[in-house]
Image: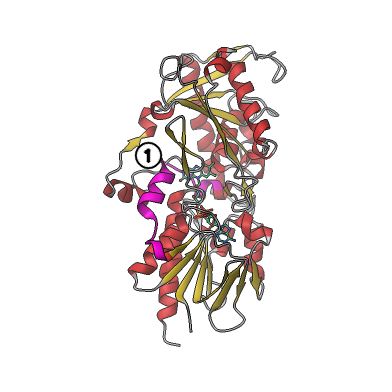
Amino acid sequence: MFDTDIAVVGAGVAGLAAATSLRQAGLTCVVLEAGTEVGGRARTSLLAGAPFDHGASWLHQGESNPLTPLARAAGLDAVDFSATRVERIHIPDVNSGPKGGPTNGHWATTAEQHDAQRAETRLSRLLSDRATRAPDISLAQAAAPLQADPWTHSLLQWEGAIIAAADAERLSLKDWHANLLLGHNLCLREGIGSFVARHLAPPAGEVRLGHAVTRIDRTGPGVVLSGAWGSLRARAVIVTVSTGVLASGAIRFDPPLPIATQEAIAHLPMGLLSKVGLAAAPERAGKERLGVPNSCSIWRRRRPGEPALVMMAWPLGRPYIAGHFGGQTAWDHTNPADAEALVRAELVDLFGHQATTLLNGPAVVTDWGTNPRFLGAYAYAPPGFHGARAALGTPIDDGRVMLAGEACHATLAGTVGGAWLSGQGAARQMTELIRQPA
Ligand SMILES: Cc1cc2nc3c(=O)[nH]c(=O)nc-3n(C[C@H](O)[C@H](O)[C@H](O)COP(=O)(O)OP(=O)(O)OC[C@H]3O[C@@H](n4cnc5c(N)ncnc54)[C@H](O)[C@@H]3O)c2cc1C
């Protein structure tokens, strides 16, 4: 009667984790993936011959990340990026204009770098203290007592737009606190997307690429999934698409999802983090480095109204600089030409026209905000909605439908580790439900 025990929608990290767990539990499963490859938001391509991660590039909380032992078991070289990373901070002159010409200023001295570190400690103590109190407020509101500190705005840009993909004004303080990514970040030399595709993909027959699901019908026994490719009947389904895809209505649920689930989707909108990778011209790669070392994180002390934009130069010695920009800055630059222009202008502002001459190799611009398979980078909780992640992962009806993915994880949201654990957890719960006597 059923084509398979469980259908899994999406072959991102959560979908692959679910498929692995279901297989281990002795259940049959079919993974339906709209795209032409597995991995979802874990995707590596080559830029000037070196791995470039469009989405995930670090295994956060490396020591306890569930993917670290899998990467090590696969014999991969996991580099402690936190120990390798160096930092350069640019401090603009007080009267220097934010736009329309080079910003005058200087690179932070050692004393100024220490000053920035102390400001970071002060801010994180304040935020952590406030996070334990009711009611939930935004990250920006919680930081208000330190508003006059010249570092606060840039540090909030890091925590909000760059790390959480949403500006600090929009972020729930409690959700931010629950998802603090402490400990070391690990980096895989071959790229996280490559690792996922090569070592975590299910056996060939289990995954069907180019199978966009447009309807999930549970009006009869089990569930019927359908799309332009045809239909498939399963006893139950785990849906791992982003909350952006769920909110877009690209998948019609019949009957509609319960109100509590619909509210959870609405309360976990997608943030955006974009990357532009600019490679050095082949004849110059490895020789000129704009005076910055490998794995150098470059950022500015910013004022309100300035873009949330940071650079990662020559990560692990790769021949490119990657601009990362998030939150409203990223939503305002979803056009690839605008995005590239933003990053190039910042580099010229920081290093002068030698940046243009050097970085005229191939370029790559990510498309997470406009790609209909994602519609954002990862989900964030606005103030007051930190409980939405648990609500999103609650089994629907009699457990015939479960949503899983990064947005459902309470403490590793927005990460591959969280997606993996969420997919595994949904599969375990579904296995138990399905094995209960009727
Ligand atoms: C720019 C960026 C940087 C990031 N950096 C990091 C990082 O450094 N470290 C980290 O841990 N995490 C990072 N992340 C987050 C991490 O990549 C995600 O949290 C994780 O990959 C999400 O996995 P998932 O399985 O939940 O969702 P997805 O990867 O989105 O998987 C869902 C799958 O569903 C498919 N799909 C969509 N619609 C349909 C449909 N209708 N039918 C069938 N299939 C469909 C999609 O194609 C996709 O393959 C980053 C993400 C981005 C975008």
- 111 or 395: nearer the eye? 395
Which residue: 57% across, 23% down? 300
Q: Horizontal and vertical percent for residue 130?
A: 56, 44
- 30 or 317: nearer the eye? 30
Ligand 1 is within 8 Å of the C-beta of the residue at disc 1: no
Colour approach in the figure: secondary structure
Along the horizontal axis of the image, is 306 left or right of 431? Answer: right
Q: Horizontal and vertical percent for residue 418?
A: 46, 53
Along the horizontal axis of the image, is 13 left or right of 214? Answer: left
Which residue: 67% across, 69% down? 259
Q: Which residue is mark 1?
A: 190
Q: Horizontal and vertical percent for residue 290?
A: 49, 15
Label 1 CA crowd tier, 10 Å (few <14, some 14–19, many 20+) = some
Which residue: 62% across, 17% down? 349
* SS at badge 1: loop
Residue 122 belongs to the span the image colors magenta: no
Q: Is residue 342 above or below residue 252?
A: above
Which residue: 27% across, 49% down? 73
Q: Horizontal and vertical percent for residue 353?
A: 59, 13
Range of magenta residues: 176-205
At label 1, the amino acid type is Glu
Residue 189 belongs to the span the image colors magenta: yes
Along the horizontal axis of the image, is 325 left or right of 312? Answer: right
Q: Residue furthest bottom?
A: 438
Q: Is residue 282 above or below residue 204?
A: above
- Residue 313 in sight: no
Quadrant for the C terminus in the image: bottom left
- Residue 52 in sight: yes
